Image (spheres, rainbow, N blue to C red):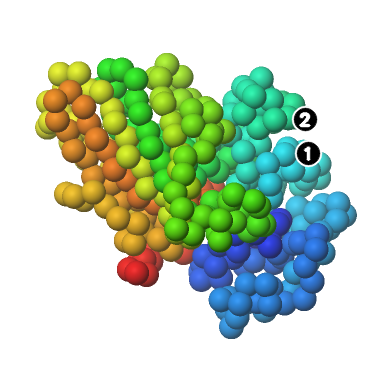
Amino acid sequence: MIRAAILGGTGYGGMELLRYLVGHPGVEVTALTSRSEEGPVSDRHPHLAGFTRLNFTKETEDVRLRLARENDVVFFAKPHGVSATELPTLLEAAPELRVVDLSGDFRLPDPGQYPTWYGYEHPHPDLLALSEYGLAECGQRDAVRDARLVANPGCHAAASILALWPLARLGLIKGRVSVVSVTGSSGSGARPKQGTHHPERFSNFKAYRPLYHQHLPEVIHAMGGDTRVDFVPHSAPFARGIHVTAFVPVGDATDDAVHEAFTGVYHDEPFVRRHDVPPDLRGCVGTNFVDYCVTPGDGVACVTLAIDNLGKGMAGSAIQNMNLMFGLEETTGLDRPGAGL
Protein backbone atom coordinates (compact mmCIF):
# COMPACT_ATOMS: atom_id res chain seq x y z
CA MET A 1 0.00 0.00 0.00
CA ILE A 2 1.17 3.51 -0.84
CA ARG A 3 1.22 5.65 2.27
CA ALA A 4 -0.11 9.13 1.53
CA ALA A 5 -0.54 12.31 3.54
CA ILE A 6 -2.62 15.32 2.53
CA LEU A 7 -1.28 18.67 3.73
CA GLY A 8 -4.18 21.10 3.89
CA GLY A 9 -7.38 19.25 4.59
CA THR A 10 -10.04 21.90 5.14
CA GLY A 11 -10.35 23.21 1.58
CA TYR A 12 -12.04 21.67 -1.43
CA GLY A 13 -8.78 20.25 -2.78
CA GLY A 14 -7.97 18.26 0.35
CA MET A 15 -11.61 17.23 0.72
CA GLU A 16 -11.84 15.92 -2.83
CA LEU A 17 -8.48 14.14 -2.62
CA LEU A 18 -9.70 12.26 0.42
CA ARG A 19 -13.04 11.46 -1.24
CA TYR A 20 -11.25 9.70 -4.08
CA LEU A 21 -8.54 8.11 -1.95
CA VAL A 22 -10.83 6.45 0.60
CA GLY A 23 -11.93 4.21 -2.26
CA HIS A 24 -8.46 3.70 -3.76
CA PRO A 25 -7.38 0.06 -3.34
CA GLY A 26 -3.67 0.85 -3.38
CA VAL A 27 -3.46 3.80 -0.97
CA GLU A 28 -3.60 4.27 2.79
CA VAL A 29 -4.21 7.89 3.78
CA THR A 30 -2.28 8.36 7.01
CA ALA A 31 -3.02 12.03 7.75
CA LEU A 32 -5.08 15.03 6.74
CA THR A 33 -3.54 18.14 8.23
CA SER A 34 -4.99 21.46 9.28
CA ARG A 35 -3.76 24.53 11.13
CA SER A 36 -7.21 25.28 12.54
CA GLU A 37 -9.42 22.16 12.57
CA GLU A 38 -9.35 19.41 15.18
CA GLY A 39 -11.35 16.24 15.73
CA PRO A 40 -12.93 13.87 13.18
CA VAL A 41 -12.50 14.74 9.53
CA SER A 42 -16.13 13.78 8.93
CA ASP A 43 -17.26 16.65 11.18
CA ARG A 44 -15.85 19.09 8.62
CA HIS A 45 -16.67 16.91 5.59
CA PRO A 46 -19.89 15.11 6.58
CA HIS A 47 -20.30 13.38 3.22
CA LEU A 48 -17.26 11.25 4.18
CA ALA A 49 -18.86 9.94 7.38
CA GLY A 50 -18.59 6.16 7.44
CA PHE A 51 -15.77 6.18 4.88
CA THR A 52 -12.93 7.47 7.05
CA ARG A 53 -12.04 7.45 10.73
CA LEU A 54 -9.27 9.98 10.35
CA ASN A 55 -8.95 12.89 12.72
CA PHE A 56 -7.35 16.11 11.57
CA THR A 57 -3.63 16.25 12.33
CA LYS A 58 -2.55 19.58 13.76
CA GLU A 59 0.08 20.87 11.36
CA THR A 60 3.44 22.23 12.46
CA GLU A 61 6.85 22.16 10.82
CA ASP A 62 7.84 19.14 12.90
CA VAL A 63 4.65 17.33 11.88
CA ARG A 64 5.33 18.04 8.21
CA LEU A 65 8.84 16.62 8.52
CA ARG A 66 7.55 13.52 10.27
CA LEU A 67 4.90 12.94 7.64
CA ALA A 68 7.47 13.39 4.88
CA ARG A 69 9.64 10.67 6.40
CA GLU A 70 6.76 8.28 7.13
CA ASN A 71 4.92 8.49 3.80
CA ASP A 72 5.59 7.62 0.18
CA VAL A 73 3.74 10.60 -1.26
CA VAL A 74 2.52 13.94 0.05
CA PHE A 75 -0.20 15.99 -1.59
CA PHE A 76 0.07 19.74 -1.02
CA ALA A 77 -3.47 21.18 -1.04
CA LYS A 78 -2.62 24.68 0.11
CA PRO A 79 -2.91 28.22 -1.29
CA HIS A 80 -0.43 29.59 -3.80
CA GLY A 81 2.88 30.59 -2.26
CA VAL A 82 2.90 28.06 0.58
CA SER A 83 4.39 24.90 -0.91
CA ALA A 84 7.21 26.88 -2.54
CA THR A 85 8.32 27.80 0.97
CA GLU A 86 7.59 24.54 2.83
CA LEU A 87 8.46 21.90 0.26
CA PRO A 88 12.30 22.14 0.03
CA THR A 89 12.90 21.02 3.64
CA LEU A 90 10.60 18.01 3.12
CA LEU A 91 12.40 16.89 -0.02
CA GLU A 92 15.74 17.22 1.75
CA ALA A 93 14.56 15.37 4.86
CA ALA A 94 12.99 12.47 2.92
CA PRO A 95 15.04 11.60 -0.19
CA GLU A 96 12.51 9.00 -1.40
CA LEU A 97 9.45 11.20 -0.93
CA ARG A 98 7.34 12.08 -3.97
CA VAL A 99 5.08 15.13 -4.06
CA VAL A 100 2.03 16.28 -5.99
CA ASP A 101 1.41 20.02 -5.54
CA LEU A 102 -2.07 21.37 -6.29
CA SER A 103 -1.05 25.04 -6.14
CA GLY A 104 0.54 27.17 -8.84
CA ASP A 105 3.94 27.28 -7.15
CA PHE A 106 5.73 24.96 -9.59
CA ARG A 107 3.63 25.19 -12.77
CA LEU A 108 5.67 27.83 -14.59
CA PRO A 109 9.26 26.94 -15.57
CA ASP A 110 10.43 30.58 -15.69
CA PRO A 111 10.85 32.11 -12.20
CA GLY A 112 10.57 35.55 -13.74
CA GLN A 113 6.88 34.94 -14.45
CA TYR A 114 5.83 34.49 -10.81
CA PRO A 115 5.81 38.19 -9.79
CA THR A 116 3.60 39.00 -12.79
CA TRP A 117 1.13 36.13 -12.56
CA TYR A 118 1.16 35.15 -8.88
CA GLY A 119 2.38 38.30 -7.18
CA TYR A 120 5.51 36.97 -5.47
CA GLU A 121 9.16 36.22 -6.13
CA HIS A 122 9.68 32.47 -6.21
CA PRO A 123 11.71 31.55 -3.08
CA HIS A 124 13.26 28.40 -4.60
CA PRO A 125 13.61 28.80 -8.37
CA ASP A 126 16.08 25.90 -8.44
CA LEU A 127 13.19 23.50 -7.76
CA LEU A 128 11.33 24.56 -10.91
CA ALA A 129 13.68 22.39 -12.96
CA LEU A 130 12.79 19.42 -10.73
CA SER A 131 9.06 19.83 -11.30
CA GLU A 132 7.07 18.18 -14.08
CA TYR A 133 3.72 19.51 -15.29
CA GLY A 134 1.12 16.83 -14.70
CA LEU A 135 -1.40 16.63 -17.54
CA ALA A 136 -0.94 13.08 -18.76
CA GLU A 137 -3.17 13.27 -21.85
CA CYS A 138 -1.14 16.12 -23.32
CA GLY A 139 2.33 14.65 -23.60
CA GLN A 140 3.48 14.61 -19.97
CA ARG A 141 2.77 10.97 -19.09
CA ASP A 142 6.34 9.63 -19.28
CA ALA A 143 7.78 12.65 -17.47
CA VAL A 144 5.25 12.24 -14.65
CA ARG A 145 6.18 8.57 -14.20
CA ASP A 146 9.77 9.53 -13.42
CA ALA A 147 9.07 12.74 -11.50
CA ARG A 148 9.70 13.38 -7.85
CA LEU A 149 7.66 16.59 -7.88
CA VAL A 150 4.56 17.04 -10.04
CA ALA A 151 2.87 20.40 -10.50
CA ASN A 152 -0.83 19.73 -10.88
CA PRO A 153 -2.43 21.91 -13.59
CA GLY A 154 -4.75 24.76 -12.82
CA CYS A 155 -8.40 23.96 -13.51
CA HIS A 156 -8.96 26.56 -16.26
CA ALA A 157 -5.58 25.65 -17.73
CA ALA A 158 -6.29 21.91 -17.79
CA ALA A 159 -9.57 22.40 -19.65
CA SER A 160 -8.09 24.91 -22.10
CA ILE A 161 -5.00 22.83 -22.86
CA LEU A 162 -7.08 19.71 -23.40
CA ALA A 163 -9.21 21.67 -25.89
CA LEU A 164 -6.23 23.03 -27.84
CA TRP A 165 -3.37 20.57 -27.57
CA PRO A 166 -4.34 18.09 -30.33
CA LEU A 167 -4.40 20.91 -32.88
CA ALA A 168 -1.22 22.52 -31.54
CA ARG A 169 0.59 19.17 -31.58
CA LEU A 170 0.10 18.85 -35.35
CA GLY A 171 0.76 22.51 -36.13
CA LEU A 172 -2.83 23.11 -37.22
CA ILE A 173 -3.31 26.33 -35.25
CA LYS A 174 -2.90 29.13 -37.81
CA GLY A 175 -3.51 32.27 -35.81
CA ARG A 176 -4.73 33.80 -32.61
CA VAL A 177 -6.89 31.54 -30.40
CA SER A 178 -9.85 32.72 -28.33
CA VAL A 179 -10.90 30.75 -25.25
CA VAL A 180 -13.95 31.38 -23.07
CA SER A 181 -13.93 29.37 -19.85
CA VAL A 182 -16.84 29.25 -17.39
CA THR A 183 -16.35 27.95 -13.84
CA GLY A 184 -18.46 27.19 -10.80
CA SER A 185 -18.13 28.81 -7.39
CA SER A 186 -16.04 26.00 -5.87
CA GLY A 187 -13.19 27.16 -8.09
CA SER A 188 -12.76 30.14 -5.78
CA GLY A 189 -12.00 27.96 -2.77
CA ALA A 190 -13.79 27.14 0.46
CA ARG A 191 -13.23 30.48 2.19
CA PRO A 192 -15.99 33.00 1.40
CA LYS A 193 -14.80 36.16 -0.32
CA GLN A 194 -16.75 39.13 -1.61
CA GLY A 195 -17.62 38.56 -5.24
CA THR A 196 -16.75 34.85 -5.27
CA HIS A 197 -18.89 33.52 -2.40
CA HIS A 198 -21.78 31.51 -3.83
CA PRO A 199 -24.58 33.82 -2.62
CA GLU A 200 -22.87 36.60 -4.59
CA ARG A 201 -22.78 34.39 -7.69
CA PHE A 202 -26.28 32.93 -7.47
CA SER A 203 -28.40 34.13 -10.41
CA ASN A 204 -25.37 36.07 -11.63
CA PHE A 205 -22.83 35.70 -14.43
CA LYS A 206 -19.72 37.74 -15.11
CA ALA A 207 -16.25 37.75 -16.62
CA TYR A 208 -13.20 38.29 -14.45
CA ARG A 209 -9.50 38.90 -15.09
CA PRO A 210 -10.03 39.04 -18.87
CA LEU A 211 -6.79 38.38 -20.78
CA TYR A 212 -4.73 38.33 -17.55
CA HIS A 213 -5.74 35.25 -15.56
CA GLN A 214 -2.87 33.41 -13.83
CA HIS A 215 -3.61 30.17 -15.72
CA LEU A 216 -2.91 31.77 -19.11
CA PRO A 217 0.89 31.23 -19.09
CA GLU A 218 0.33 27.52 -18.43
CA VAL A 219 -1.77 27.31 -21.57
CA ILE A 220 0.73 29.24 -23.68
CA HIS A 221 3.63 27.12 -22.43
CA ALA A 222 1.75 23.90 -23.25
CA MET A 223 1.16 25.18 -26.79
CA GLY A 224 4.92 25.57 -27.25
CA GLY A 225 5.21 29.22 -26.25
CA ASP A 226 4.43 30.83 -29.61
CA THR A 227 0.65 30.54 -29.89
CA ARG A 228 -1.28 33.70 -29.03
CA VAL A 229 -4.20 32.91 -26.75
CA ASP A 230 -6.88 35.38 -25.68
CA PHE A 231 -8.35 33.87 -22.54
CA VAL A 232 -11.42 35.14 -20.68
CA PRO A 233 -12.71 33.25 -17.62
CA HIS A 234 -16.27 33.63 -16.36
CA SER A 235 -17.94 33.12 -13.00
CA ALA A 236 -21.20 31.15 -13.20
CA PRO A 237 -23.99 30.39 -10.71
CA PHE A 238 -23.30 26.67 -10.22
CA ALA A 239 -21.06 24.99 -7.66
CA ARG A 240 -18.65 22.85 -9.68
CA GLY A 241 -17.53 22.25 -13.23
CA ILE A 242 -15.73 24.07 -16.04
CA HIS A 243 -17.05 24.53 -19.56
CA VAL A 244 -14.66 25.79 -22.24
CA THR A 245 -15.44 27.11 -25.71
CA ALA A 246 -12.34 27.58 -27.86
CA PHE A 247 -12.30 29.23 -31.29
CA VAL A 248 -9.23 28.02 -33.15
CA PRO A 249 -8.15 29.25 -36.62
CA VAL A 250 -7.05 26.21 -38.64
CA GLY A 251 -6.48 27.77 -42.08
CA ASP A 252 -7.21 25.40 -44.93
CA ALA A 253 -7.15 22.22 -42.81
CA THR A 254 -9.99 19.92 -43.84
CA ASP A 255 -12.77 18.96 -41.47
CA ASP A 256 -11.43 15.40 -41.47
CA ALA A 257 -7.96 16.62 -40.52
CA VAL A 258 -9.38 18.57 -37.59
CA HIS A 259 -11.37 15.59 -36.32
CA GLU A 260 -8.43 13.23 -36.81
CA ALA A 261 -6.19 15.53 -34.76
CA PHE A 262 -8.39 14.80 -31.74
CA THR A 263 -9.15 11.14 -32.35
CA GLY A 264 -5.50 10.44 -33.07
CA VAL A 265 -4.50 11.74 -29.64
CA TYR A 266 -7.47 10.89 -27.46
CA HIS A 267 -8.96 7.65 -28.85
CA ASP A 268 -7.16 5.46 -26.28
CA GLU A 269 -7.29 7.90 -23.38
CA PRO A 270 -9.34 6.33 -20.57
CA PHE A 271 -10.70 9.63 -19.25
CA VAL A 272 -11.42 11.45 -22.52
CA ARG A 273 -14.80 11.03 -24.20
CA ARG A 274 -15.76 12.38 -27.63
CA HIS A 275 -19.29 13.70 -28.20
CA ASP A 276 -21.08 14.45 -31.45
CA VAL A 277 -22.79 17.46 -29.88
CA PRO A 278 -21.39 19.96 -27.37
CA PRO A 279 -21.18 18.32 -23.94
CA ASP A 280 -22.86 19.57 -20.80
CA LEU A 281 -21.39 19.54 -17.31
CA ARG A 282 -23.66 16.92 -15.82
CA GLY A 283 -21.85 14.04 -17.45
CA CYS A 284 -18.49 14.77 -15.85
CA VAL A 285 -19.19 16.49 -12.52
CA GLY A 286 -17.87 14.33 -9.69
CA THR A 287 -15.46 12.50 -12.02
CA ASN A 288 -12.05 12.67 -13.68
CA PHE A 289 -13.57 12.55 -17.17
CA VAL A 290 -13.10 15.02 -20.02
CA ASP A 291 -16.03 15.42 -22.42
CA TYR A 292 -15.43 17.25 -25.70
CA CYS A 293 -16.92 18.03 -29.10
CA VAL A 294 -15.20 19.50 -32.18
CA THR A 295 -17.12 21.48 -34.78
CA PRO A 296 -14.96 22.54 -37.76
CA GLY A 297 -16.08 24.98 -40.41
CA ASP A 298 -14.82 27.77 -42.68
CA GLY A 299 -11.24 27.85 -41.42
CA VAL A 300 -12.15 27.67 -37.73
CA ALA A 301 -12.54 24.81 -35.28
CA CYS A 302 -14.92 25.35 -32.38
CA VAL A 303 -13.97 23.07 -29.49
CA THR A 304 -16.36 22.70 -26.57
CA LEU A 305 -15.11 20.80 -23.55
CA ALA A 306 -16.33 20.08 -20.01
CA ILE A 307 -14.54 18.88 -16.90
CA ASP A 308 -15.13 18.93 -13.16
CA ASN A 309 -12.90 21.65 -11.73
CA LEU A 310 -12.47 19.64 -8.52
CA GLY A 311 -11.98 16.37 -10.43
CA LYS A 312 -9.96 16.54 -13.64
CA GLY A 313 -9.20 20.15 -12.77
CA MET A 314 -7.72 19.28 -9.38
CA ALA A 315 -7.92 16.12 -7.26
CA GLY A 316 -8.67 13.66 -10.05
CA SER A 317 -5.59 14.70 -12.02
CA ALA A 318 -3.53 14.63 -8.82
CA ILE A 319 -4.45 11.01 -8.15
CA GLN A 320 -3.97 10.09 -11.81
CA ASN A 321 -0.47 11.57 -11.52
CA MET A 322 0.19 9.64 -8.32
CA ASN A 323 -0.88 6.40 -10.03
CA LEU A 324 1.64 7.06 -12.80
CA MET A 325 4.41 7.93 -10.34
CA PHE A 326 4.01 4.62 -8.52
CA GLY A 327 3.46 2.37 -11.52
CA LEU A 328 -0.23 1.71 -10.90
CA GLU A 329 -2.93 1.39 -13.52
CA GLU A 330 -3.76 4.99 -14.37
CA THR A 331 -7.48 4.64 -13.71
CA THR A 332 -7.13 3.07 -10.25
CA GLY A 333 -9.51 4.73 -7.81
CA LEU A 334 -10.85 7.08 -10.49
CA ASP A 335 -13.00 5.00 -12.83
CA ARG A 336 -16.49 5.98 -11.73
CA PRO A 337 -19.59 7.48 -13.38
CA GLY A 338 -20.87 10.97 -12.75
CA ALA A 339 -24.00 11.76 -10.79
CA GLY A 340 -25.96 12.64 -13.93
CA LEU A 341 -27.86 15.51 -12.32
Contact, mark 1 vs mark 2 (Cβ under 8 Å): yes
Picture coordinates of residue 6 (x, y %)? 67, 58
Residue 303 seen in the current view: yes
Residue 282 lies in quadrant: bottom left
Return the residue nearer the eye: 10 or 237: 237
Residue 144 seen in the current view: no
Q: Is residue 157 above or below residue 35?
A: above
Q: Amino acid at mark 1?
A: Thr
Picture coordinates of residue 123 (x, y %)? 77, 30
Left or right: where 124 falls relative to 216: right
Element carrying mark 1: helix
Q: Which residue is mark 1?
A: 85
Split into 4 quadrants, where in the image is the C terminus? bottom left
Left or right: where 82 falls relative to 61: left
Q: Is residue 41 above or below residue 258?
A: below
Q: Which residue is mark 2?
A: 123
Query: Disc 1 to disc 2, how far (Cα)?
Result: 6 Å
User: For the residue carrying disc 1, how many other residues have a C-alpha within 10 Å: few (<14), some (14-19), or many (20+)?
Assistant: few
